[in-house]
Amino acid sequence: MFNFLTQKFSSIFSSFNGNTKLTESNIDDALKQVSESLLEADVPNHVVIDFINQIKQETLGKEIIKSLNPGQQFIKIVYERLCEFLGGKNAIAPTFQIPSVIMVLGLQGSGKTTTVAKLANYLQDLSKKKGKTRKILLGSVDFYRPAAIDQLEILSKQVNVEFYRSSQADVIKAAKEIYNQFKQKEYDYLILDTAGRLHIDNKMLQELQEINLILEPKYKILVLDSMTGQESLKVAQAFDQNIGFNSAILTKLDSETRAGAAFAFRYILKKPISFIGSGEKIEDLELFYPERMATRILGMGDVLTLVEKAESKIKKSEQDRLANAISSGNFTLQDFASQLDMVGNLGSLSKIMQYLPGMGSVKLTPEIMEKGEAEVKKFKAILNSMTVKEKVFPRILDNSRKQRIAKGSGTIVIDVNLLLEKFEQSKQFAKLFKRHGNFKDMFK
Ligand SMILES: Nc1nc2c(ncn2[C@@H]2O[C@H](COP(=O)(O)OP(=O)(O)OP(=O)(O)O)[C@@H](O)[C@H]2O)c(=O)[nH]1
Ligand SMILES: [Mg+2]
């Protein structure tokens, strides 16, 4: 419990540590935290280093917002930059002109065939909403996996769009035949499913290049499995160099993956991610939201919510008063009470935990947190039962006073003593803090 409280205090105190600008040393911890988060999300090491260095250069020397500590502020900036890298604040719905060919590319099992059906469903829904009907044709040139073409045919029925099966056994000839069908019957969209391989191989790339030359698809969409992690970056690069594509769809985001691949993809290839796949059903296709993805990649819960709460709830005047109390060395029980209040103001401790970066790895069980909350509540009750004089001069607390306080707060004398003990420890922090100025080091 005490460790936990000191962590809370450290984040509150550290906003008083006199730094007015972001420096290499005061963002040190946050830097490590962010790097770890990105690496854990499976962002390739060189991308992490590059990104972090870039942000570091941009932020050093920046003013610190009063109510944030340097670490929080740094994380806030990282979060905002990450959103930017991922494509801005809002989701952008891609447009598909008519008539057009949409070719879907990707490795084996990445979700191409499913995505073809999902896209058809999306385009159909979209046109219905606009009061229009679109003629959509699905076709497949996947001759590698038995039943791959049947799979698409079944899906086309589910979506209720047309499907064309070529009589040709050769990939290129089949592609031509499907394309002719699309032209002749004047479809609005042809969505073409292609074969995948377990790994990038030359024959596959060659075939795709040929189809690309013949059909000249207006849209080429790379389907990336978000669970394959760093490997998918190499895949994307190979597809880009050999065939080229307009955007990517990231599938299987309904899994546990933190999807660092999404960030690496955007960072290196600088192409948009248009949709995400969020399940196996045909309606499980969603627009890509950079903000949601940034939160997921950082694995920090809603960092900004915490930051906003901290900004609005910790009143500046109270901060100043406490800062004065600490720097003058007159840290009283009254100040201790204020500290507890500040912690309380941020919501219940267990709630705060969800918002705290890096806390995911700290093994705080619900029991420990509950105990922590109960303790803070108890302390507050005890402090409420004390007179001002007792709070300013706690040494006058003899046994009979303690008994009175315990009775008044519905606790026992042992609790009162515990509170005084914690207060003493907190006072030591305040002193140490005053001496060293740098709080962070004390919590290592
Ligand atoms: N949970 C989940 N499963 C998905 C998603 N997209 C596809 N799948 C599943 O992933 C598996 C492979 O999907 P396919 O669409 O057959 O993949 P493919 O890329 O066409 O595979 P090949 O044709 O063998 O190269 C299937 O079991 C799909 O149901 C998704 O967004 N979420
Ligand atoms: Mg397939």
Image (cartoon, grey):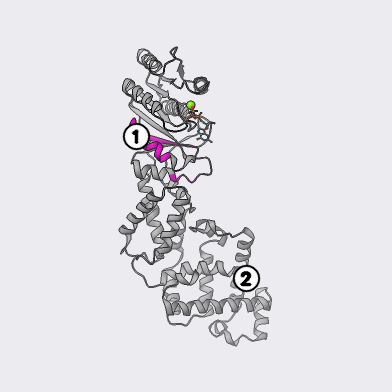
* Residue 33 visible in rendering: yes
Residue 123, image x and y in percent?
Answer: 42, 27
**Residue that mark 1 sits on:** 240
Residue carrying label 2: 378
Q: Residues within 10 Å of mark 2 (few under 14, many from 20)?
A: some
Image quadrant for the N terminus? bottom right
Foreground disc of the pair 1, 2: 1
Question: Does the stretch in magenta take in 222?
Answer: no
Q: Position of residue 258 (x, y in %)?
A: 48, 46
Under circle 1, the secondary element is helix
Q: Is residue 250 magenta?
A: yes
- Kindly report the distance in space between the C-alpha atoms of the residues bearing marks 1 and 2: 62 Å
Decide: is 95 above or below 423. Answer: above
Label 2 residue near ligand 1, CB within 8 Å? no
Disc 1 under 8 Å from ligand 1? The reply is no
User: The residue under label 2 is which amino acid type?
Assistant: Lys
Residue 98 in sight in this render: no
**Nearest to the observer: residue 163 or residue 31:** 31
117 over 422 or under it: above or below: above
Give the vertical position of 414 relative to 230 (above or below). below
Q: Is residue 359 left or right of residue 189?
A: right
- Residue 425: image location, x then y, percent: 55, 77
Q: Position of residue 107 (x, y in %)?
A: 45, 32
Dot label at residue 393: none
Sequence-earlier tag: 1 or 2 = 1
Amino acid at the residue labelled 1:
Asp
Q: Which residues are magenta?
A: 232-260
